[in-house]
Image (cartoon, helix red, strand yellow):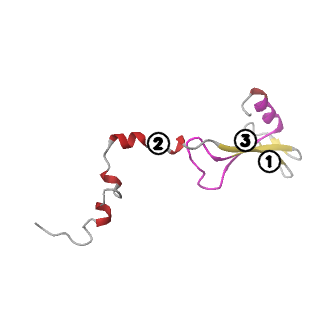
């Protein structure tokens, strides 16, 4: 029997069945494990702001300036995904677009 070099041997830590996740082949175990989205909900909020500088709506590309507008801020979506480049996703809505969403029942 050939002996393996020290770098090729599996460490005793990985041979421990409690620690080694690769040794778990129990189908019942995998059925009990839930995806992260089962534990998370959409985390979002509406923020009312004033446009001191010109902005554009993300929906209609309408210019917003010297009036109130609304930002829909999402910090975690329904799948448990978080933004990578910043701390949140932001969508800009005009006052009329926000009111239309309220009237159609899309916003609580």
Q: Is residue 29 above or below residue 6?
A: above
How far, Cα to Cα, is label 2 from label 1? 41 Å
Residue in the picture at 74% in, 28% down: 105
Q: Position of residue 48 (x, y in %)?
A: 81, 45
Q: Position of residue 35 (x, y in %)?
A: 48, 43
Q: Please report the bounds of the magenta region as a residue range.
A: 74-102
Residue assigned mark 1: 55
From the image, which quarter does the N terminus lie in?
bottom left
Task: Determine contact: label 2, label 3, CB under 8 Å.
Answer: no
Residue assigned mark 2: 34
In the image, 90: left or right of 11?
right
How far, Cα to Cα, is label 2 from label 3? 35 Å
How far, Cα to Cα, is label 1 from label 3? 9 Å
Q: Is residue 63 above or below residue 4?
A: above
From the image, which quarter does the C terminus lie in?
top right
Residue in the picture at 38% in, 42% down: 30
Quarter of the image where one finds residue 26: top left
Q: Position of residue 24 (x, y in %)?
A: 32, 49
Membership of 76 in magenta stretch: yes
Please rate how many residues cluster around mark 1, counting C-alpha atoms within 10 Å: few if below 14, some from 14 to 19, many from 20. some
Membership of 66 in magenta stretch: no
On residue 58, the disc is 3
Q: Secondary structure at mark 1?
A: strand
In the image, 42: left or right of 2?
right
């Amino acid at each position: 029997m050939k002996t393996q070099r020290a770098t090729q041997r599996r460490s005793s830590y990985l041979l421990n069945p409690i620690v080694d996740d690769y040794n778990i082949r129990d189908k019942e175990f995998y059925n009990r494990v839930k995806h992260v989205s089962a534990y998370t909900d959409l985390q979002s909020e509406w923020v009312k702001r004033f446009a001191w500088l010109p902005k554009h709506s993300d929906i209609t590309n309408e210019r917003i300036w010297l009036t109130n507008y609304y930002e829909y801020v999402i910090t975690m979506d329904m799948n448990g995904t978080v933004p990578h480049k910043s701390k949140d996703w932001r969508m800009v809505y005009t006052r009329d677009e926000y009111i239309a969403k309220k009237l159609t029942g899309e916003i609580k």
